[in-house]
Image (cartoon, rainbow, N blue to C red):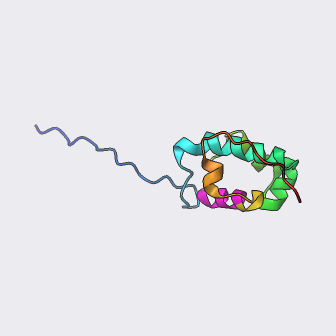
Amino acid sequence: MRKPPKKVSKRKLRLDRHGRRKFPEGSHGNFCRNVKALRKDRHWSQESLGYALGMTRNHVTDIERGRNSPTLDLVDRFARALKVTSSFLLDSVEHNFPAHTS
């Protein structure tokens, strides 16, 4: 009797429940730390950042704490709201954020 072929694990692109691409695995912690540091540097509350993004404070909290993985679209929205690039948010280097003037 022949053995069934072994399943070859193909690394598939992760999608969220709406079919959008999920956040890259290794950068999630970097993103969380950088968003929180930038938000605090600008003296914004989670509520005010959530308002700028069109989401609730609870959702911002969950993302900062790593409970929710943001989609790539959401990473772009955070970057625009915080006036930095997406790659800056995903970077693993610890940044000394300049004082924000506005």
| Residue 17 screen position, x and y as percent | 58, 56
User: What's the magenta region?
Assistant: 72-79
Q: Residue 25 in magenta? A: no
- Report the residue at 45% width, 54% height from top: 13
- Is 84 in front, or is 51? 84
Task: Using the image, determine if residue 73 lies above or below residue 10.
Answer: below
- Report the residue at 35% width, 48% height from top: 10
Q: Quadrant of the C terminus?
A: bottom right
Asked if one can make out residue 70 in the rendered structure from this viewpoint, the answer is no
- Report the residue at 82% width, 50% height from top: 57
| Residue 21 screen position, x and y as percent | 53, 58
| Residue 67 screen position, x and y as percent | 67, 40
- Report the residue at 63% width, 56% height from top: 86
Asked if one can make out residue 81 in the rendered structure from this viewpoint, the answer is yes
Residue 69 relative to residue 45: left or right: left
Q: Quadrant of the N terminus?
A: top left
